[in-house]
Image (tube, coloured by chain):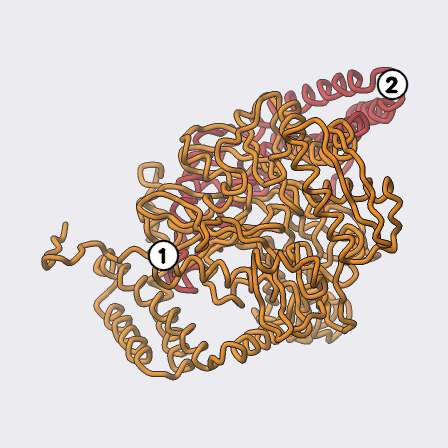
Chain colours: A orange, B red
Amino acid sequence: MALLQISEPGQSTAPHQHRLAAGIDLGTTNSLIASVRSGLAEVLEDENGRFLLPSVVRYRPDGSPIVGYDAKAAVVQDPLNTIVSVKRLMGRGVADLKLLGGRLPYEFAQGDSAVPRIRTAAGEVSAVEVSAEILKALKHRAEEALGGELNGVVVTVPAYFDDAQRQATKDAGRLAGLNVLRLLNEPTAAAVAYGLDRGSDGVIAVYDLGGGTFDISILRLNRGVFEVLATGGDTALGGDDMDRAVAQWIMTQAGIGDDADHAQLRRLMREACAAKEALTETEATGLVVERMDGSRWQGRLTRAQLHELIDPLIRKTLSACRRALRDAGVAVEDIREVVMVGGSTRVPRVRELVGEFFQRPPLVDIDPEKVVAVGAAIQADILVGNKPEDEMLLLDVIPLSLGIETMGGLVEKLIPRNTTIPVARAQEFTTFKDGQTAMAFHVVQGERELVSDCRSLARFELHGIPAMVAGAARIQVTFQVDADGLLSVTAREKTTGVQSSIEVKPSYGLAEHEIERMLRDSFDHAREDMELRRLREQQVEADRVVEALEAALATDGEALLSRDERAAIDAALLAVKQARQGDDHLAIKRAVEALEKTCAEYVARRMNTSIQQAMAGHKVEDFGG
Amino acid sequence: MTADLLSGNHFEIFGLPARFALDQEQLAERYRELQRAVHPDRYANAGAQERRLAVQRAAQINEAFQVLRDPLARAKYLLELHGVQVDDGQNTAMDPVFLMEQMELREALSEVRGHAEPQAALARLFQDISARIQDLTALLGGELDRATPDALRQARDNVRKLQFLGRLREEALELEADLEEGLG
């Protein structure tokens, strides 16, 4: 029966008001934030009309951070306190630093943390904290422009990011005080921006060459569903590497040795980048470099020379494209369109070679620097609940295989790469000693057979296995990857049903207590109260649960619940609302947990109903209810 | 407790008859409809509990879809539904004629690199492998439909053969990749 809603004049009949949402492209070189306003996704500008925020954070002598253009301007003058390209350090360990394109112009603190810490005027900072500063600046920009607090954001990551890099990005969002609704793969975001624009179905390739990362994704579009078929790439290959190749060339030509200092290296990189950009317009460009001893070197770089320097890098990306096509099971001829993403695709040589490879001119009509943020904004708008009728759905994949270490340092793959997420795989293990009550696992990510060639994600320790004779326990370990591409592990002993507890030691991530400490520290700066912050978080969660539940009850509470069940839920709901009025965050948390327990059955029934509706007319026999 | 609607077998989840022959288009269409109903993105604003449930349901549907859309995985799954394990480590004796052919195919694969025109040689090999896969897959359909103990045994043997050929095909793909990289 349809219910008529009678509204007072001037009141909206909409079930909920427009929520503020934004999409964030957290880039290696530049970051952007976009939002859907009056149905149109647009990149938000700063007060000077600039849409890019350089991903540069400088810690001033008093320890306070500045972000963006002002920070970037200090790169040469204050290199040790000015952090650039921090994205390259996300989810990386101390041992990885050497592999990240040679010399990094910072001082790293010697410590026992798995996460590298940069020594700055603000003390030692991790990549997560530096990224959080960038996110805070973007948050501030959006809240100024949109006139209110953001309800939720979508943050993009390279499709090829592993679990540790994704977790680090999510941690940075949390540290910045953002409600991260989803981590979205950059190429998928770009496809959304283009796909909705064109409404065309078929297989498309997204070629994304940023400052520090390269991604290739092959997607199938089918009536609003974006299904990623395969993804590949290189998290340490980008436009910076082109600049570095040119800088190396200049150093050789100018006779500058490897002993150049940080400031000199920064100047060289800038000169190299400028030369690369100049050569998009002209056939040759002049170079002037000051040596350490004050003498000057003058030279010339032609376009042909530039191509010689950067072609090997571009060919590396094309090899990855070939692999992705093979993984997707499609031929070059099957690709309907090629979408270009990332500032480095402005380089004409990149467009030329990519066009040659895919046998068609690539699409560049949405600004390649804006397209990812625009796509993220579109998804954020849907996820936050502003478009309940929207049919868009993104089905992404896990970019690298997940496995566990077995005897002899070998990897047993549990979830192969390019498996659609969310995914869960269970594996059974047994004890090898009588009375054994604990067990250790080492989870790795990568395609190689040896553990030492893969990326270590985490070590898990299972405790509380019931003591039995060797081989009698049957421990089922479930590895689940959620829609963000993040792994979680649960374990259960099957004969007794005992749930084992799991202790996670992330190999390159921040432990929960480290994040807690950072949160505390950041509030010391802002002179905010940690307790207040906890209260605020719980209130937001309580509001979210209450709003979702009330909307659900209005739709199908009548149909799915008995009178008693409804009464129990109403009582638990009231308890949450009452706790919400108070200032005890623990009380709110307990009330929400009690409500969720009361609603468990109802929630399951609702999900079944929606499955039933999806399958309506398809089933031969009726679902059992 | 409410019955879990997805507790049925993979075919039941998609409302399809448990047969080897399957309409891929229909499967994909229903997959998309189901994901639209349960995908975590649909529950981004729900409480933590509902979000967890959505992740589990979406994972279940993904798993079922992965199995059904791949002919070999589908055949193995149907055999399991009939109580026949493919990889039980028993009755692993293979048809000697088939093993002979496998050895020849492997030899051909290992000789590709030394060939004057390696890519052409590899293409021929691909054709050969694909034709064999096609023939065996065609047999499987009938055997799984008959589902007599005899037919199921034959189906199991054919699934094992297909696994051999599948691995060979993988290796050929890797070789193709290597050859292309070499040219790249």
Residue A520, percent from left and from top? 55, 78
Q: Which mark is residue A547?
A: none
Tag 2: amino acid: His
Tag 1: amino acid: Leu
Give the image quarter of residue A61. Answer: bottom right
Give the image quarter of residue A103. Answer: bottom right
The chain ID associated with circle 2 is B
Q: Which residue is mark 1?
A: A146
Q: Residue at x 70, y 47 (%)?
A: A270
Q: Nearer the viewer, residue B156 or A240?
A: A240
Residue A210's place in the image compared with A425, above or below, is above
Q: Which mark is residue B115?
A: 2
Q: Nearer the viewer, residue A209 or A282?
A: A282
Q: Residue at x 22, y 54 (%)?
A: A14
Q: Secondary structure at mark 1?
A: helix
Residue B158, percent from left and from top? 67, 30
**Does residue A489 appear left or right of residue A392 in this picture?**
right
Residue A193, percent from left and from top? 45, 39
Residue under disc 1 on the same chain as residue under disc 2: no
Residue A118's place in the image compared with A583, above or below, is above
